[in-house]
């Protein structure tokens, strides 16, 4: 009888722990998505300006482009002490990778031409 009560109690604790872990994961994921959206909105104007000024084989035209997309924050590379993020824009077949820390843009038409 005691064994059944102990097992039942452990099962209830395990279910409660799993529910709390899933709830916390949901809350943290929501906060991270909100922060990512805020950062993307903050960086967007700088990225467009830097990409239009960057030199490449073909000019990057965001404002006059027929097919434009925001790829967003990507390519997070961890350094020994830093996290380096990249912001990517796509306009008329040209990719532009913008580094928000260095304020530098690189243009390439496919992933082989990009760093």
Image: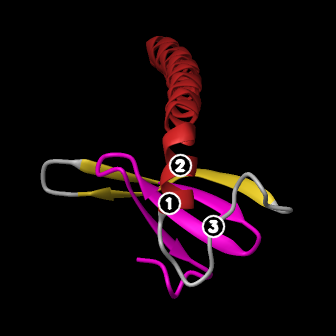
Pinpoint residue 101: horizontal percent, then vertical percent.
Answer: 30, 46
Residue that carries the numbered disc 1 in the rendered image: 53
Label located before the other in sequence (2 or 3): 2
Stretch in magenta = 87-115
Query: Which dot marks residue 26?
Result: none
Residue that carries the numbered disc 2 in the rendered image: 49
Pinpoint residue 15: horizontal percent, then vertical percent.
Answer: 57, 21
Q: Residue at x 33, y 59 (%)?
A: 77
Please say if 67 is above or below 87: below
Indicate the secondary structure of the residue bearing disc 1.
helix
Where residue 45 sits, quadrant-wise, is: top right
Indicate the secondary structure of the residue bearing disc 3.
loop
Marks 3/1: CA–CA distance: 8 Å
Residue that carries the numbered disc 3 in the rendered image: 60
Residue 63 within the segment the image draws in magenta:
no
Colour style of the rendered protein structure: secondary structure
Where residue 94 sits, quadrant-wise, is: bottom right
Please say if 28 is above or below 39: above
User: Within 10 Å of the Cα at label 1, are there few (<14), some (14-19), or many (20+) other Cα atoms?
Assistant: some
Label located before the other in sequence (3 or 1): 1
Pinpoint residue 95: horizontal percent, then vertical percent.
Answer: 61, 69
Indicate the secondary structure of the residue bearing disc 2.
helix
Please say if 52 is above or below 27: below
């Amino acid at each position: 009888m005691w064994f059944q009560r102990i097992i039942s109690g452990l099962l209830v604790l395990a279910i409660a722990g799993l529910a709390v872990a899933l709830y916390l994961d949901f809350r943290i994921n929501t906060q991270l998505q909100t922060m990512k959206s805020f950062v993307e909105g903050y960086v967007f104007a700088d990225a467009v300006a830097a990409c239009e000024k960057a030199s490449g084989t073909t000019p990057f035209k965001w404002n006059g482009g027929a097919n434009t997309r925001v790829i967003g924050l990507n390519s997070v590379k961890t350094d020994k002490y830093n996290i380096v993020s990249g912001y990517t824009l796509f306009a008329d077949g040209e990719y532009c990778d913008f580094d928000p820390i260095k304020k530098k843009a690189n243009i390439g038409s496919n992933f082989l031409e990009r760093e």
